[in-house]
Image (tube, rainbow, N blue to C red):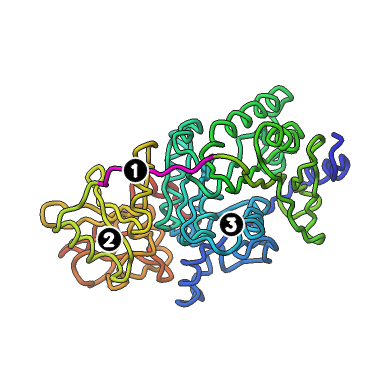
Amino acid sequence: MNIKGFGREAFEQVHALEEQVTSIRLNPFKSVALAMNGKDNLTQSAICNLKSAIAWCPHGFYLPHRPSFTFDPLFHAGVYYVQEASSMFLWEVLKQTAGDNTNGMKVLDLCAAPGGKSTLLASYFQHGLVVANEVIKARAAVLVENITKWGSANVIVSNNDPKDFSALPGYFDIMVIDAPCSGSGLFRRDAQAINEWSEENVQLCSQRQQRILADAYAALKNGGLLVYSTCSYSKQEDEDILDWLCGNFEVENLPLSINGAWGIVETESDIHKAKGYRFYPYKVQGEGFFIAAFRKKDGIAEEYRVQGLTKTTKEETEATGRFIQEDSAFTFFKQGGGIIAIPVAFKNDVAALQKHLYLRKAGITAGSLKGSDFVPAHELAMSMIVNKNIPGIELAYPQAIQYLQKKDIETGNFEKGWSLATYGNINLGWMKVLPNRVNNYYPVEWRILKDAPGR
């Protein structure tokens, strides 16, 4: 393979070692809350064993070994996301191309499942709107779960084909396309990727990547940022795609400033000399990855006139409001029997997107009104907008695992009514304390199915 930075001997050696590099990215909101509350008694959590920081992402850290994330309550609480270190370089790309003034920006993560880059985008664009899309229904369900656990209210999950976004010309300020690929960058981590790799699959992936880019391109505004990435080493899926983009669309390639100590290799395409960035596992502490950035230089902007969202009744609004922070700048609407809270700034955007796309999740589902009783949703418990005055029941580690297994737990003599189950004072979900028992409201489809080690 005649590609800059590739060394066959070093490549084979690092894969022969079968070394596992494990990294996580902290949720800036929940990890700060955890630090304020203290974590001295949370020795079972991965966050107590951070090894070193990842240079290109302020919230990324390596772990000394791979723990059992399944039995870490803070993993289920969305305090961190297990993400490959090379993929976190997206943060540095955004820092250099989008900058810090991101208020009101609309961002599309086109191929989003399972949610690593979407949760990163939600953290970076704290005052923007992130649309996380996944075309495959089953993978979209996983995406909804991970976005829910992250707790950001500024994320919409859609389940659409890339061509559906052509109905929204010039809508997005930023488009991230982590394209489906042949997966050679994952050889060290995933043995199945080796078995599935072939030259024919590389060609099929290259053609599919072109179709995805062509189908979604119109939705990016003039002057918008396009970030393209793969986990492939193949030139046909990387540099050749950059040439294809430059040859078929009015785009400007955006070179990045790379710290030489990082081990990242800058390459360029054959025809248009577009810059891309390669990650080799024998040069960086991470897996194989490729990324490049472009500025769109054509296209038209359109105004989107939309129908209003279905309003909540006075009773629904008042009941929901008691479970949400008083200073939250949110508005409510109804969908499928649920009451949904969205930032006021993006009310019209949700309506516009709902008109053209199939939305699996928008903002935070707060709950529903059953007669005169408000039943809070799990999304609200995981969010950062839940009312801090709602009672919390702090669980010891064994109790927290029982809760996440959706088993009955004893909590002692607590105030009757809705309470938040917490671990390290971080919310795990809802419980309802009744006179003779405690009802566990953790979602049955997300429960831990295995028994904890040593039990």
Q: Is residue 27 visible?
A: yes
Across and down, in percent, residue 47 comes to 56, 66
Quarter holding residue 426 = bottom left
| Residue at the limit of the structure toward the left, as seen here | 371
Does the magenta run of residues contain 80? no
74 and 227: which is toward the camera: 227
Amino acid bearing label 1: Arg
Residue at the image point whose x is 65% and y is 38% from the top: 250
Where is mark 1, residue-wise?
305
Disc nearer the start of the sequence (1/2): 1
Left or right: where 149 falls relative to 6: left
Residue at the image point whose x is 59% and y is 48% from the top: 223
The residues tagged by marks 1 and 2 sit, at their Cα atoms, a distance apart of 42 Å
Q: How many marks?
A: 3
Where is mark 3, residue-wise?
67
Left or right: where 259 falls relative to 316: right
The residues tagged by marks 2 and 3 sit, at their Cα atoms, a distance apart of 28 Å
Q: Which residues are magenta?
A: 300-309
Q: Quadrant of the C terminus?
A: bottom left
Where is mark 2, residue-wise?
431
Amino acid bearing label 3: Pro
Q: Do callouts 1 and 2 mark residues in contact (Cβ within 8 Å)?
A: no
Does the magenta run of residues contain 301? yes
Q: Quadrant of the N terminus?
A: top right
Across and down, in percent, residue 282 comes to 80, 50
Question: Dominant secondary structure of the magenta stretch?
Answer: loop
